[in-house]
Image (tube, rainbow, N blue to C red):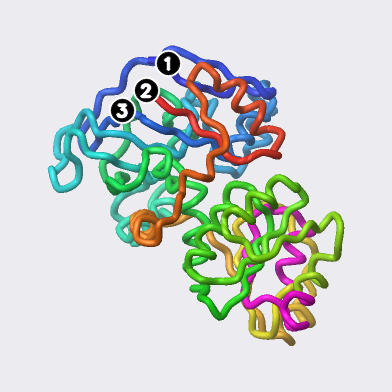
Amino acid sequence: MRGVTFPGDRKVAIMEFDDPTPGPGEVVIEVKASGLCGSDLHGYRAPSDDRAFRELAKGKPYETMRDTGPKIAGHEPCGIVVAIGPGVSDRVARIGQRVMIHHYSGCHVCDQCRTGWPQMCEGMVPDIYGWTAHGAHAQYMKCAAHTLVTLPDELSFEAGAAIACGSGTSYAALRKIQPNASHTVAIFGQGPVGLSGTQFAAALGARVIALDVNKERLEMARRFGAAETINPAEVDAVEAIRELTHGRGAHFSLETSGAPQAIEGATKCLRLWGTAVFVGLGKPPVVDFASDVIFRQISLQGSFTFSTNIMEECAIFSVDRGVEVDAIFSDRWTLDQAGEAYELLDRQASGKGVIVF
């Protein structure tokens, strides 16, 4: 079979790989949709020189990607189970089952793994599909059976691919603050994670203020349920949020971009006792903990993707609330168009892309 790899220097290579065969505790899925994620750009943009890549990747989960040979990219998988290895119960996987894949696999036995959080594994450095193990930018993908999450019949394979990373990440972050119709939520960054956060927060009944420097993304945020939009390149974002909230500030903020200005804004825009949740990876500015945090009694929380249970909950919520999760995809590609797809993603100005089979 053919699979998409990242040789570095903003290049894509489609290589030949053997069709996977499931071992004990494993399954193979026929991939139907595989989303493109902004975090893929780390591998796509990395230097082609292995020494330079290892230095860039040091301390990051994809640091061994090239040491063990090319890996098929794609960590937002969704498809159908087509092969089952020894020891996998039919309660876990069945031929023909529609599934999403939680893209981490740990030791299976520590407290974090047993509660559905293998990315927090205490027993080993977890495998990450699409980085340290083969991912979903190919016709078939092998994975540990315990990473499967059933895709409801009401959702498309593309919706499942979105929930498998970006949309699931925003849902899990919002779940930590539980916004409702009495709350205003300021969402900094309207890339795929921020836009899906806007979708879910609006579905929960919250008033969403969406922020981004890209006008097209702000227009999408309106379509996805944002009550107000703000372009921080044109106005003082914190002051604009206070004007929209009777001078008090937002109850909650969700930061998805990792930009220092956005991280600062997500902290300063809150009212007394507010809570900020941070998803975007970036270098934060210096926070004045006395005046910005302690004296205003605000809470700062981090949120790192989601558990298998939350992934399942996100899918069910989307069905019950009629959230059009797959509307996040503005571009659909074939495997042969992967190079073009990543060129567009690299510009970080459009919506989200997905490879469909």
Q: Are marks 3 and 1 in contact (CB under 8 Å)?
A: no
Q: Is residue 199 magenta?
A: no
- Where is residue 224 drawn, in percent x and y? 57, 55
Q: Closer to the camera: disc 3 or disc 1?
A: 3
Q: CA distance from mark 3 to mark 1?
A: 13 Å
In space, the residues marked 2 and 1 are separated at their CA atoms by: 7 Å
Q: Say if 308 sits above or below 80 in the image.
A: below
Q: Quadrant of residue 230?
A: bottom right
**Which of the two residues, 112 or 309, is positioned nearer the viewer here?**
309
Q: CA distance from mark 3 to mark 2?
A: 6 Å
Mark 3 crowd level (few <14, some 14–19, many ≥20, 10 Å Cα): many
Mark 2 in CB contact with mark 1 (< 8 angstroms): yes
Residue that badge 3 annotates? 30
Residues at discs 3 and 2 in contact (Cβ within 8 Å) = yes
Mark 2 lies on residue = 139
**Which residue type carries mark 3?**
Glu
> Along the horizontal axis of the image, is 217 left or right of 331?
right
Q: Disc 1 marks which amino acid?
A: Arg
Q: Which residue is mark 1?
A: 2
Residue 122 in view here: no
* Side (left or right) of 280 relative to 328: right
Among numbered discs 3 and 2, the one appearing first in the sequence: 3
